[in-house]
Amino acid sequence: MRWLLALETEKDPIAICRLMNIFRRKGVSILKLELASLATSFALSALVETRDSDVPHLFHFLRRTEGVREVTCYRDEPSADANGNGSPAWAAANCDSSRIIHTSRTAGEQGVIGARSHAPVESVAVS
Amino acid sequence: MAKATGSEILLESLHREKVEVIFGLPGGAVLPLYDALYSAGIRHLLVRHEQAAAFAADGYARAKGKPGVLLVTSGPGATNVMTGLTSALMDSIPVVALTGQVPASVIGKDAFQEADTVGISLPCTKQNFLAKSAAELPAIIHRAFRAAVSGRPGPVLVDLPKSVLMELAEASYPESAASEHPKREREWQDADLERAAEMIASSRHAVLYVGGGVIHSEAWDSLLALAELTQIPVTTTLMGLGAFPSRHPLSLGMLGMHGSYATNMAICKCDLLIAVGARFDDRVTGRINGFATEAKKIQIDVDPSEVNKNVAVDLALVGDARGVLEALIEELKRRAARGDSPAHAGRVEWLKRIEGWRAEHPLTYDKYAHTVKPQFVIETLSRYADEDAIVSVDVGQHQMWAAQFFDFYQPRTWLSSSGLGAMGYGFPAAMGAQQAFPDRQVMAVVGDGGFQMTLNDLATVAQYRIPVKIAVINNRALGMVRQWQEIFFEKRYCDIDLNFAPDFAKLAESYGIRGLKVEHRTDVVDAVREFLGDREPCLVDFWVDPAENVYPIVPPGASLGEMVVEPPPVLVEEEESFDDLWAV
């Protein structure tokens, strides 16, 4: 299954190296990759291919990886341009919450939680 | 604010994290830190190999429930701890590794004793840091300790360039220790809990399958309360031993590849499997498509990525195990108050059925053999050990016999490199546990193969008079490998002979540690009484039957129900049973 992965990490190359190693070890096939340096974070967008059953595992594994801030998985729906060429859909996907499969973003932030995603993590301090 | 060196700031940060002991070995890159340690008031245990520092920190953490800390130098010092960190990662143990690094100006230029420690440790750690300034050390140490204990615990590495350790800076420290009150995660919903209670109430043949997560979460009291409320029997993984009392009527012991017949049959025939802090490891499940096929499954885990990873479950409650169990108990009590008791008549029949399996094929061994049976040694050690004794094992046949025949009454009394299976772990981990509890009995039960990997730290035991007890289950071979070659490779024994080895008792004596050797079955009981009779370090070399195999065994590719239960019976060779020897 092809799907789109968008995530942000803390602005430290260690976090990106850790991610790349995770992709390698988990057998994620990277078809397209974009990496951007933002003010306080790195942003990664990728078109990847994995088994269908691996998608939720990867989502949860990535969202609980130290250094990773936000993770969203989108359905891939490539759109053709005027010349009939397919193009990466993540630029559009970031604004298209209907394509969300899983997200660690809470409701109220950009996009909404998709039907199949988990509720945001709630931490309860215990003394 | 007065300035301090990076070394002083680092040690103050460790003080604030309530670090009591560091396991380490100095070298050039960390000389500034050791100079500050000279008067810092934190205990330091000098080991003889950095791998021992990592295993000792791990053993400390498992026993104490607090992060273990190690300190090593750059290059080979750092690379020598990677096995220990990988073991801690596999078993989710909080360890903070401080590694020296060459000065920042020469990183990446192949300096003397430089290694890409961050790069090498990426897959071996939960998180790692490279300090770039002395001023950021308090924040890094705080984050490191928090990462080590929060959520699913794990090892964290902080790489410390020598220039940072020497740099002067003003430091600002966090208000409280990161590791003192870790947040308990909760992602489950009330509706999930109600569904779990419903599934429990409607099950007739349930089993609680418990792993190390119950110990990490300190959920053992809740587990006991749940089991007794519902009368559901409890099986533990290798990591979960000690989470439930071995002698409790609801205890099933260990399941899986070397689990007991009754336990594995219970898994095969149960209609509800409740996994608490356990990850459906392959040593537990056997062939996945044959695992607990008649059961609905509930999985309780703090790590959402473990849900459905190996085995598909019907319901998942993601969160801290203790929080889930406490809430589940309350829900079940509410249902009971309405007349829907979770401990119904069906449970009694189920427990009787399990007892029947137990009677059919109990865990046993040849009680009349003339050789020293390793199982008898383990049972005798268990019989004479303190109830709160801490047992650290190495990896191999002795590990499985200890899991089968040692009785555990409390959590955090069983230390085992379970997921990675790192030989050499047992003895240094025991040293670490002894540092956590100087007044408790701590025993390393090790094989001759694993012991030879880390026995150089007998010097550490001697130097600090660490009262650890070392029982070597000596079959003069790599026993588990030999067993597999016997059963699965048609006895084509290859490279398993360890007959060329030192006399371990004499070796111990050469370090100034009392050493005993046992070669006859009638000497075992007296030797164990002497061995455990004081608070001095002692080693006993038990020469056991080299042909003994671990049973039951689930062959690779087989399901739990296809286990090989025991070998054919042998002729009676002695008049007295091993059981009779305890009465002497």
Image: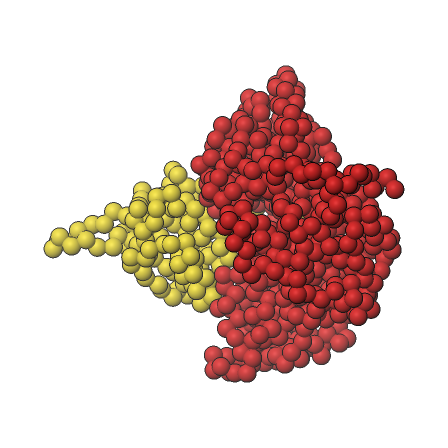
Chain colours: A yellow, B red
B567 or B428, nearer to the observer: B567
Tally the numbered discs.
0
Residue lying at 77% horizontally and 54% vertically, measured from the top left: B519
Q: Is A94 left, or right, of B380 in this rendering?
A: left
Residue B369, percent from left and from top:
73, 43
Up-down relation of residue B30 to residue B443 (above or below): below
Quadrant containing the C terminus of chain B in the rendered view? top right
Residue lying at 50% horizontally and 68% vertically, measured from the top left: B120
Residue B85, percent from left and from top:
58, 61
The answer to whether residue A25 is visible is yes
Q: Is B77 left, or right, of B313 in this rendering?
A: right
Up-down relation of residue B341 to residue B69 (above or below): above
Residue lying at 56% horizontally and 75% vertically, measured from the top left: B75
Residue furthest to the left in view is A83
Q: Is A123 left, or right, of B548 in this rendering?
A: left
Residue B536, percent from left and from top:
84, 60
Quadrant containing the N terminus of chain B in the rendered view? bottom right
B214 or B583, nearer to the observer: B583
The answer to whether residue B392 is visible is no
Residue lying at 28% horizontally and 55% vertically, measured from the top left: A91
Residue B479, percent from left and from top:
62, 53
Up-down relation of residue B488 to residue B357 (above or below): below
A47 or B431, nearer to the observer: B431
